[in-house]
Image (cartoon, rainbow, N blue to C red):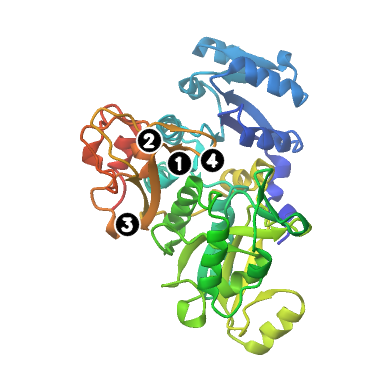
Amino acid sequence: MNYELLFKELQDRRIRIALTGANGGFSRTLLVQCRAVANIEIAALCDLDLEGTLAMLETLGIPAASVGICRDQAQVRAAAAAGKIVLVGDHALLDGVALDIVVEATGQPEVSVSIATAAISRGVHVAMVTKETDSAVGPYLNRLALEHGVVYTTVDGDQPSNLIGLVTWARLLGFDIVAAGKSSEYDYIYHAGERQIEYTEQRHAVDGLDALWELGDDIPARLAQRSAALAALPQSATPDYCELNVVCNSTGLLPARDALNYPLCRISELADVFIPREDGGILDRVGVVDVFNCLRRHDEASFGGGVFIVVRCIDETVWKLLQQKGHVVSRRRQYACIYLPYHLMGLESLMSLFSAVLHSRPSGSDKQAVHAVMLARAQRDFKAGEVLSMGGHQHHISDIAPLLVPATEAGGKAPFYLAANKRLRTNVARGADITVEALELDGSALYDAWKQLPA
């Protein structure tokens, strides 16, 4: 694909963007690339930390004199007329800025859904980085955008959009997809000489991993042994469920299992792991999404938080040829893994903006539906009146486990991020899923949107 030809209209067009959650890590990566493309105009930025955002912009070479801090619509109009970047703390002020697209990256679902709804309602495209919002009410926002003649899209550079791209590429080419997925956020890096595993830049002693390095004949058993050997380390992460929820709703693929599988495996093993049990793998069904924990030696390349698909090999001769060229093919050449070993965050997100603004097409799906729901399961007894507080880098809820289930199994249960930061109306027993009825939802914009999800 020649992308310069695909988006040649950019030569004659400026794209005016607003970025919310402007002082976050993702936003910085996008702003860096916006500065490198002449026809991108940073029209407005929104963040509660105005001074911190100004300081961040200075480090990118954007002087404070080119930015106008605005606290009302009159100041917005004046700053825009002067050709300055409009910087606001109140997202409602974005309504006064002429825009082509809003990139929503606050990470706060209740705020995020209001920003997206307001933009769509006034005819502005929305690129949704806040996947927590997308997982809960993406199909509603997708439908609302279609009704208003604009685009609502996932964003390239994050795993959901990248995986949707890989899945749809494969389907268009006629591949039979057995599984699609991603690696979890952090690698498990083995330093064999020291018998240590490095995880999130911390070293941990581990014994016996050398003997478990090869898959052996019983793959599920070997994966269980690896998991037990590293039981002291986390082996699942809340964002993975959220991201794959978005992929399910955009592709129609279903979760491999409620808790996802999270095998500790090497890149070269993926085509032997994510295949049906009758062929030696771990899957109870096909056409699914799943996650793996990337296990590698310290001198091997990372998967980079990338994405993969496992497809059926139709012609053994073809895949033998490709295997000889280094592609990941299963032992019996029945399955192959095709993967992208990276996600570059905002550095590649402009592709989604180009597609939305120049071609009126999402880089995700234009037909989102509720195929799966991310649920919240209590890991202890909760009392009425407690708040399910969301926090941390991974946007987890304390003492709540995420699950991802087919939508047909989610009746009456609350999406994980609808429950986030809500007060409980009732007691919830350990092991029970949080229901909509158990939550205080008065005044929740996310709840209002959720109630309008397409059937």
Cα–Cα span, label 4 and label 2: 18 Å
* 3 or 2: tag closer to the N-terminus: 3
Q: Which mark is residue 407?
A: 3
Confirm whether residue 366 shows in the render: no
Mark 2 lies on a secondary structure that is loop
Q: Which mark is residue 132?
A: 1
Residues at marks 4 and 2 touching, judged by CB atoms closer than 8 Å: no
On screen, residue 23 versus residue 89, left or right, reads right
Q: Which mark is residue 442?
A: none
* Rendered-image quadrant of the N terminus: bottom right
On screen, residue 250 versus residue 313, left or right, reads left
Q: Which mark is residue 420?
A: 2
Residues at marks 2 and 1 touching, judged by CB atoms closer than 8 Å: yes
Q: How would you rate the neighbour count of disc 4 (Cα within 10 Å): few for under 14, some for 14-19, many for 20 or more?
A: many
Cα–Cα span, label 2 and label 1: 10 Å
Which numbered disc, 4 or 3, marks the residue closer to the eye? 3
Q: Which mark is residue 129?
A: 4
* 4 or 2: tag closer to the N-terminus: 4
Which residue is pictured at 30% across the width and 35% down the height?
Answer: 448
Type of the residue with mark 1: Glu
Residues at marks 3 and 1 touching, judged by CB atoms closer than 8 Å: no
Rendered location of residue 215, percent (x, y): 61, 73
Rendered location of residue 383, percent (x, y): 25, 33
Q: Quadrant of residue 248?
A: bottom left
Cα–Cα span, label 3 and label 1: 17 Å
Which residue is pictured at 20% across the width and 35% down the height?
Answer: 426
Type of the residue with mark 4: Val
